[in-house]
Amino acid sequence: SQTIHQWPATLVQPVGSPLSLECTVEGTSNPNLYWYRQAAGRGLQLLFYSVGIGQISSEVPQNLSASRPQDRQFILSSKKLLLSDSGFYLCAWSGPAGATGELFFGEGSRLTVL
Amino acid sequence: SQQGEEDPQALSIQEGENATMNCSYKTSINNLQWYRQNSGRGLVHLILIRSNEREKHSGRLRVTLDTSKKSSSLLITASRAADTASYFCATDVGFQKLVFGTGTRLLVSP
């Protein structure tokens, strides 16, 4: 069966510090991978998605970046965090093109920037 | 930007009652999906309805889709306290992307 792991679960960082959130998927090949952010009490904002190694599409221009160094690994990074980067970050995967499009989510990483 | 808008934003009912949530969206879609999120957790997929379908059932869930009105509804019958969660609609707009709505917070009291 497929599983998705996301870490760290909770992170408190000072403004201006770097960020690295990691997500890995097991039990499937060539998944589509996604990073979403959820502000408190709000819906989900799509940040990045990837359909293959090294292929990253950005939805929201900002000081965050994403990388996919391996087929089932997706990393969200920032060189210098802003207060507005606080939120609940969710990684998700779906089957490749032609699949149903259902997303499978990780348990999320709660980031607080102070 | 948000594609979907759920209505109501919050809903409070008693156990055994039915809960209805609505979703409106703006652009053409391939399919529409509903997800559930328990507080502080990841989202869980509930049901998918394709653009050429009008109604779909899964257990106590019933979803309708009206593409002419760009709207969908989720009905949970005979609600239980364990159904307490936030519910989101998400539209498949193509290009491997799902765009989520703002969510409905459902509280089911025993």
Image (tube, coloured by chain):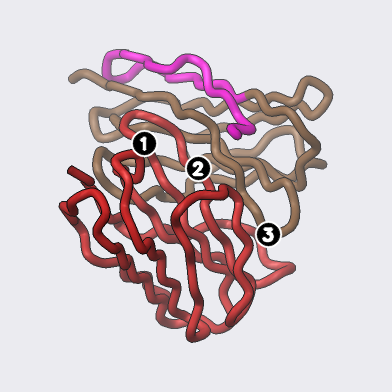
Q: Nearer the viewer, residue B3 or A16?
A: A16
Disc 1 and disc 2 in contact, CB within 8 angstroms? yes
Residue that badge 2 annotates: A45
Q: Which residue is mark 1?
A: A39
Q: Residues within 10 Å of mark 1 (few under 14, many from 20)?
A: some
Give the Cα distance between marks 3 and 1: 23 Å
Q: Which residue is mark 3?
A: B96
x 75%, y 25%: residue = B70
- Chain letter, red in picture: A
Disc 3 marks a residue whose amino acid type is: Gln
What residue is drawn where x is 23% and y is 49%?
A: A15
Q: CA distance from mark 1 to mark 2?
A: 8 Å
Q: Which one is in front in this view, the residue at disc 3 or the one at disc 2?
A: 2
Chain letter for the residue marked with disc 3 in the picture: B
In the picture, measured across the screen, residue B52 lies left or right of residue A30, that is: right
- Write down which chain is painted brown: B
Query: At 54% from the left edge and 58% from the top edge, which residue is drawn?
Result: A48
